[in-house]
Every structure is written in structure tokens, then in C-alpha cells.
Image: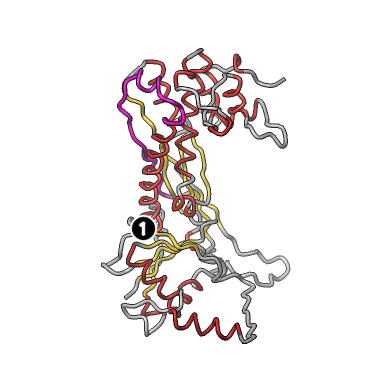
């Protein structure tokens, strides 16, 4: 039987929290979405409640007012999760954040001890190498251990000071714009913390190694060269570096290195026009598709241009506390207070130590 709105209760938020789930996740376990469905379980409840969250002007359909969440007790219970979903969507779709986080993990507390892979077998310093093992001999051991330092979660977001009546009479799509703006700034604050974790580590002896351009190419003293950049990318072997973050000075210098001058580009166009057909394929994909990102939070090291490089699929994990947004929005709607807190408790840690490195131009 499909889950119906009248079955929604306060306790379901607590039940979801106890299972380290958001309400949306929990509802999916109670009422799984059919294959091919365009709506998830939470969205189907919004539809049952007659709440329209997005305007479609060309179809003469317009979003409901926020007071639609106040029509019934069941409708009220939808509002906190709707706030949480809107905020999280805005944060996770922020382009820089989206390229830096490999995974988001829900937890039910404000501290988290993560597991780290230690590839250095104390009995065999070459534990990472696959070698022939004689009969009855032990394989090198890689240890998955808990970190010594717990990852602390911090609150990202804003408290909105507004009268209960003002919020109630607002169109939902207008409320979305305000929450999305808060989410954008929260995501930017998260990016600052992610870059700190890339550079300094998360407290578990995993700061990123720093490579100087002049050590990679003698011609790259205080000036980036293509050789220094390529050698830096190769430092990620056997993985690859596919994301680079730097400030304005760094991005300008890197773009000048990566893209040829107009004269060179014009020469290549002429050669191609004459029938030159040359291509080089690197099967390992070591240099292809490197995403360049700008962030003013990419701090220089020793006042030198600095590039933060990661393998985004294995470098950074975000840990967030389920229910941290819900409890505050719930207070607002139940107590009719003037402060609506739109926030999320989260923290960041390194997944694999070797998946982040730093290049300084000096």
C-alpha cells in the first residue's frame, strides 16, 4: 500500500534520525519509488498535500504560498524536510563544492571517527607492491584503522529573522530563492574548510605534500612552466589529478601555460588545413580533463602562487549530521518564532592521503 499523508507523524523524524537517515531517505524505505517514477516518496506527499513548490508560468501554474504548509498538522511536518532539501540542493550544486567532495555521509552525532587505509606494513616496507609470494608466506598487510583525531562538525548556514506572518504569506518559489542564496554562501564557506583540510589535513597526519615548481623544472623558478605542471600531475600516479583549485593569480598564470599564444594557435590551424592529421592518446588518462576551479579561499603558501590538486573521486568526504536542519525549522513552525535557522552541521576529512597534493610556484 502506498504511504499516505495521514500516516506522517513527529516520531518519523526521530525514527529517521536513529537510523542515520534523512526523512526523505526514511520515507523511501516505507514507500519505495516505482521504477521510472519522476517523484520520490517525499515529493509524492507534497503532491497529496496540494503543495506546489515551483511555478510553471507557461502552463499558468504558480507556486503555493508558504502557508500551504500550515493547513494541516501533516502539512506542517513536511515543512522542515522541505527546507532541508532546498538548502542541501543549493549547497551540493554549487560548482566548486560539487567538484571537491567525493562522498556525503550522514551520521547521528556531531563528531565522527573515520577509518584510514594504512598501506605501510611494519613487517614489509614494500607492502604496496604486488610481488610473487612463496608458498605458505604471508601477504603484505594493509591496515584499515580508525583515525586518532575525530572529525568535528560545524554549523553552516544562516538564521533568518522574519515574522511568522511574513514567511507564511510568501510564495514558496520566492522562499526558495532566499534559501538558495543562503545555501550558496554556506557552500562557499564549506569550500574554504575543504581547502584547509586538503592543505593541512584533518588532524590525522595527512597534510598534503607540497611540491615546488623549481624542483620539478629548473626553468620554473617563480614562474610556472608546462613541464613543471605535467610533472606535478604525474605525482598522483597510479591515480590521476583531475581537479586544480587556485586563486585569481594562480588561475591566470596556469591558463597562460595551458593555452598557446594566438600565433602558435594560428600556425597549428594552418598545418591542419594543409592535411596534417596528428593525434596523441594517453591510455592512462593522466592529463586529460583536468577541471580548473577558482576560489579566493585557495590561500597562498609563503606568499607564493599555490595550486591545490586532488583526485576528486577519492580525496574528500563530507560528514553531515542528519536532522541538524530539521530541528531548528521545526521549532520555527511549531512555536511561531521570528528566527528561522537554515543550516547544516557538517565536517570534512581526507579519504586517501595520496589523493591530494599542492604545487607552489617558487
Tell me the quarter of the picture where residue 358 sits.
bottom left
- Is residue 18 among the parts visible in the rendering? no
- Residue 250 locus on image (x, y percent): 35, 67
Q: In the picture provided, is 71 more to the left or to the right than 5?
A: left
- Residue 246 locus on image (x, y percent): 38, 63
Quarter occupied by the C terminus: bottom left
Q: Magenta includes 132?
A: no
Q: In the picture provided, is 115 more to the left or to the right than 132?
A: left
Tell me the quarter of the picture where residue 47 sits.
top right
For the image shown, how many numbered marks are present on the structure? 1
Instruction: Tell me which residue sits at (63%, 85%) in the image.
Output: 276
Tell me the quarter of the picture where residue 212 sits.
bottom left
Foreground of the two, 59 or 67: 59
Foreground of the two, 330 or 48: 48
Reply above or below: 307 against 259: above
Reply above or below: 43 against 103: above
Instruction: Tell me which residue sits at (47%, 77%) in the image.
Output: 231
Q: Secondary structure at mark 1?
A: helix
Reply above or below: 6 against 263: above
Q: In the picture provided, is 189 more to the left or to the right than 231?
A: left
- Residue 116 locus on image (x, y percent): 50, 53
Residue beneath disc 1: 200
How many C-alpha atoms fall within 10 Å of the one at disc 1: few (<14), some, or many (≥20)? some
**Which stretch is magenta?**
148-175
Instruction: Tell me which residue sits at (48%, 44%) in the image.
Output: 92
- Is residue 208 among the parts visible in the rendering? yes
Reply above or below: 308 against 3: below
Foreground of the two, 27 or 251: 251
Quarter occupied by the N terminus: top right
Applied colour scheme = secondary structure
Amino acid at each position: 500500500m502506498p504511504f499516505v499523508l495521514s500516516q506522517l507523524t513527529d516520531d518519523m523524524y526521530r525514527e529517521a534520525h536513529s537510523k542515520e537517515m534523512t526523512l526523505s531517505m526514511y520515507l523511501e524505505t516505507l514507500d519505495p519509488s516505482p521504477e521510472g517514477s519522476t517523484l520520490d516518496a517525499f515529493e509524492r506527499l507534497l503532491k497529496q498535500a496540494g503543495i506546489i513548490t515551483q511555478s510553471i508560468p507557461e502552463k499558468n501554474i504558480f507556486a503555493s504560498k508558504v502557508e500551504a504548509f500550515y493547513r494541516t498538522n501533516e502539512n506542517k511536518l513536511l515543512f522542515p524536510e522541505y527546507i532541508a532539501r532546498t538548502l542541501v540542493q543549493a549547497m551540493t550544486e554549487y560548482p566548486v563544492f560539487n567538484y571537491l567532495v567525493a562522498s556525503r555521509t550522514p551520521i547521528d552525532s556531531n563528531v565522527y571517527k573515520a577509518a584510514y587505509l594504512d598501506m605501510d606494513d611494519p613487517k614489509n616496507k614494500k607492502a604496496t607492491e604486488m610481488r610473487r609470494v612463496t608458498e605458505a608466506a604471508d601477504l603484505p598487510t594493509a591496515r584499515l584503522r580508525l583515525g586518532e583525531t575525530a572529525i568535528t562538525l560545524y554549523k553552516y548556514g544562516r538564521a533568518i529573522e522574519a515574522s511568522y506572518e511574513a514567511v507564511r504569506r510568501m510564495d514558496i518559489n520566492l522562499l526558495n530563492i532566499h534559501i538558495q542564496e543562503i545555501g550558496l554562501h554556506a557552500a562557499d564557506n564549506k569550500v574554504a574548510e575543504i581547502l584547509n583540510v586538503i592543505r593541512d589535513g584533518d588532524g590525522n597526519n595527512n597534510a598534503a605534500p607540497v611540491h615546488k615548481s623549481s624542483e620539478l623544472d629548473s626553468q620554473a623558478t617563480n614562474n610556472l612552466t608546462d613541464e613543471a605542471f605535467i610533472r606535478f600531475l604525474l605525482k598522483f600516479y597510479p591515480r590521476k589529478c583531475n581537479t586544480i583549485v587556485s586563486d585569481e593569480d594562480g588561475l591566470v598564470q596556469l591558463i597562460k601555460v595551458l593555452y598557446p599564444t594566438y600565433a602558435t594557435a594560428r600556425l597549428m590551424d594552418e598545418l591542419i588545413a594543409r592535411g596534417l592529421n596528428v593525434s596523441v592518446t594517453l591510455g592512462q588518462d593522466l592529463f586529460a580533463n583536468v577541471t580548473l576551479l577558482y576560489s579566493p579561499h585557495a590561500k597562498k603558501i609563503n606568499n607564493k602562487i599555490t595550486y591545490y590538486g586532488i583526485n576528486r573521486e577519492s580525496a574528500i568526504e563530507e560528514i553531515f549530521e542528519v536532522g541538524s536542519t530539521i530541528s531548528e525549522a521545526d521549532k520555527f513552525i511549531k512555536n511561531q518564532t521570528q528566527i528561522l535557522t537554515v543550516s547544516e552541521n557538517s565536517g570534512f576529512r581526507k579519504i586517501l592521503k595520496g589523493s591530494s597534493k599542492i604545487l607552489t610556484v617558487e
